[in-house]
Amino acid sequence: MTLHFINARLIDPEAGTEDLGSLSVVDGMIARRDDSAPVGARVIDCAGACLAPGIVDWGVKIGEPGERHRESFKSAALAAAAGGVTTIIARPDTAPAIDTPEVLEFVTRRAEEAAIVRIRHMAALTKARAGREMTEIGFLLDAGAIAFTDAMHVTTDTKVLSRAFTYARSLGALVIGHPQEPGLSGGAAATSGKFASLRGLPAVHPMAERIGLDRDIGLIEMTGARYHADQITTARSLPALERAKKNGFDVTAGVSIHHLTLNELDVGDYRTFFKLTPPLRSEDDRLAMVEAVASGLIDVIGSFHTPQDEESKRLPFEDAASGAVGLETLLPAALRLYHAGQLTLPQLFRAMALNPARRLGLPQGRLAEGAPADLVLFNPDTPFVLDRFKLQSKSKNTPFDGARLEGKVIATYVGGRQVFSGA
């Protein structure tokens, strides 16, 4: 189908601009901007709403295989489309882990059959994510793995990790790390400080993240591997990240939307929907992360969508499972930063669409001619109160339940095909 969007606020993260104009889509690709409608095009009057590249959400957990009751490819894709996410980068922390070409081919086929958005898979860095033996990275690359990570499981055997980094470097594979010192962070439910002490919660010092990042940067210097830190959440980690970039290492970093918009005090009276990995940080840390995204030091914003069932969350805070769903709430939560005047819309979509696509070698994330027509049309000013039971995800563990948010998706397009309508 040929489409022609008119009266749209075009959010271009590549140019860093926000302009009123038009955009044409032909055969699933962006054809041209600010031109007349192609012959036979369906004209869509955006009435001043924002038209931006679809979000590329890096670090999404889907429950297939092994935990389909928490999230399936179908339900995750429906949630993504409703949230303006057109490409999901799925984690390998499934049951079993995505650590062989056979498992990777199975989930790739299932995703193609069931999902209305694009889904690409990361593979495990070590077998069973156990940190003892690296996976066959070359075969997994050939099978379509987009990057390699053990997700939240941190390898303690540095020799195994150095071998995996070296092998990944020889193949040009991207390694994703979770910067935490596991001995310090194990069993922690909160960030150490006055709040955790008053609540009697087991806590971890922010330095655990810095120690984990320093180790990974040392291995990068030794091996030359391409590396992405999945979540930087503390101000203590930023100087090390900045030095690594200035030294010319092939390093990027991400942060979760929850660590950009919430802080440790939101836990309140042991609200388990706010139990995350890493735990929520201080307000000073949160503000430092927002500033790092604005400056470009932190490259990527992700939802880190982690579905958990009611039984695993309705437990004492210390025993409850960590994680929150975020595919559907990523955009309205991020718009909190826009409405607060902390980030512009092009800056937000640079971190949510352009940068993750570039880092992973994908053609999405742009409004340029010849780019895939993966688009989100949204009104950033539409207010609403979130009802978690209306979310498309099978699991409803969102910290934004009952929150007042602004920003509603009007329509989502993948390859020029409309996959969601918010009308």
Image (cartoon, grey):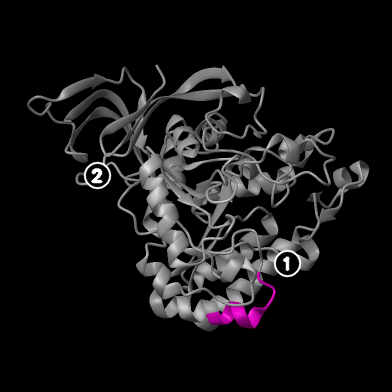
Foreground residue among 301 and 114: 114
285 or 414: which is nearer to us? 414
Which mark is on residue 368? 2
Q: Residue at x 61, y 35 (%)?
A: 395
Q: Which mark is residue 181?
A: 1
Question: Could you classify mark 1 by the number of other residues whose Cα lies within 10 Å: few (under 14), some (14-19), or many (20 or more)?
Answer: many
Q: Is residue 355 visible?
A: no
The residue stretch that appears in magenta: 155-163
Asked whether residue 27 is in view, the answer is yes
Locate residue 31 relative to residue 7 in the image: left or right: left
Q: Residue at x 86, y 43 (%)?
A: 195
Residue 267 location (% of width, % of height)? 78, 37
The answer to whether 251 is drawn above or below residue 188 in the figure is: below
Secondary structure beneath disc 1? loop
Residue 413 occupies quadrant: top left
Q: Tell me, yes or no, whether the highlighted magenta stretch contains residue 160.
A: yes
Quadrant in which the N terminus appears = top left
Which amino acid does the dot numbered 2 rest on?
A: Ala
> Could you tell which of marks 1 and 2 lies nearer the N-terminus?
1
Q: Tag 1: residue type?
A: Glu
Residue 18 percent location from the top left of the image = 35, 34
Specify the quadrant that holds the C terminus. Answer: top left
Q: Is residue 214 left or right of residue 141?
A: right
